[in-house]
Amino acid sequence: MLFRSAREQVDSYSLGWQARWLDRRLITLFGWRRDATESFVGQPPYREWADPAVPGATTSELRRYYSLARDVPFKSSPEVSVSADTKTAGAVLKVLPWLGLTYNQSANFTPSTNPSQVTFLGERPGNQSGESRDIGVRVQVFGDRLSVALNRFENSIRNQIRGGGAYVGFARGMIDRLRANYSQDSHFSALPPSGLYPVDPAQTVATDWDFDATGYELTVILNPSRRWRISLTGSINDNVLGAHLLGYGKYLNTAQPFQGLATWRRFAAELRKVEAGQPSAQFDLNPQNAAHRLQAATDALYLENQSNGAEQQYLDERALEGQTTNWSGRYAVNGVATHEFDSQGPLKGWSVGGNFRWRSADVAGYRRKLNAAGAPEGIIDVNQPISGEAFWDVGAMVRYQRRLERGLMLRLQLNVQNLPNWQDPRLVKVST
């Protein structure tokens, strides 16, 4: 659509402060940034032309010609105007020559400024915010050849904006079915053409997600000699899914003229009346016409299945709230070793290395609760996770570098992941 062309303008102000205390044993820092963001969209006048030679051009806005976006001026006043603050603070304390303590925290705020992005109810998405906190201890011994650091981290994201394409299928299917079969029905004259609802293909619908991640990370770095470097990292991560898809749930449970679970199920019930030979107050179908009764039965079944599918999809997602969603595994280990050859030998400038990574078994999905007949057709059961397998691979690296004239450095590096070329498939997502 024409009005989706946009321009964004950001004015930023920042302040930073670093200080040293206790004879440089304590270093503190503070940072602050304010971003003032404005989004402008195109404005009329513009050219809109319905070509009689194009079928449906007089009734569908998507079949008409419009001015090019570059020829449309922007509005003088912004469509969206918001301000955001990003703050960070940290400290490093040298307790002993070989022992240090670290602390970092930050808070950020990301405004929703995309005028083409809407929620399922056609509203502008809320703003995203996040916080992080990191506490660590670091030990350096053997002349700083061995460094060991342990960190505890806490991260949170509120109202993370994601694309909602995975959740429009059921609603879009039902609305398209109503458009296709009842566009000439007197009860559906107000049903807009495709492209005007948030779930339609021409729209960009957004969803909201909250996460809380906590865990520990251990890093060991060993430099046994000037040309060798070995590092090993391991982590434990608990990523908890919080409230999410609240806008989608509101959309499903808000009755609208042609949208919402209550509306779709009411249409299905009215079509069942026609199937049974009774007139409907919602459809012009003739219950005495066999073809109309067959159409009513087919469409009623479709609306029932699609509305049930939409509701179950939403309830499945809500059942995950408060659960640890370790899609990549809770435990992770990474290792890297590099060797730089002697600068005076025949391999001057060359380096080689290897790496490996390991991930514990991931949560690929959940089994479903049983219905009255004992079939797994209920919402997912978070107490019955389905896990994949632990995963690991190895890689290699070769690098060449040399100093050119005027201080320029040439560096060529080749990285090979999955060196043994293991091809076993991994179970990463399953639905029951």
Image (tube, rainbow, N blue to C red):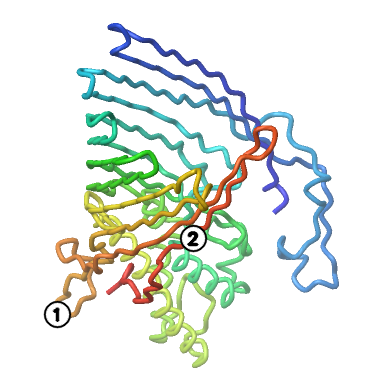
Quadrant where the image shows the N terminus? bottom right
Q: Which of the 4 image quarters holds residue 356?
A: bottom left
Residue wearing tag 1: 374
From the image, state whether disc 1 or disc 2 is nearer to you: 2
Does residue 269 appear left or right of residue 37 in this picture? left
- Residue at position x 28%, y 62% in the image: 316
Asked which secondary structure carries label 2, the reply is helix
- Residue at position x 31%, y 66% in the image: 312
Residue 207 picture location, percent across and down? 44, 50
Q: Tell me the number on the disc at residue 165.
A: 2
**Crowding near the residue tagged with mark 1, few <14, some 14–19, many ≥20 C-alpha atoms within 10 Å:** few
Q: Give the answer, above or below, for where 264 lies relative to 406.
A: below
Amino acid on which the number 2 mark rests in the picture:
Gly
Mark nearer the N terminus (1 vs 2): 2
Q: Is residue 269 visible?
A: no
Residue 85 picture location, percent across and down? 46, 24
258 or 29, which is in the foreground? Answer: 29
Residue 67 picture location, percent across and down? 82, 52
Q: Is residue 267 visible?
A: yes
175 or 113, which is in the foreground? Answer: 113
Residue 305 picture location, percent across and down? 37, 75
- Residue at position x 23%, y 54% in the image: 330
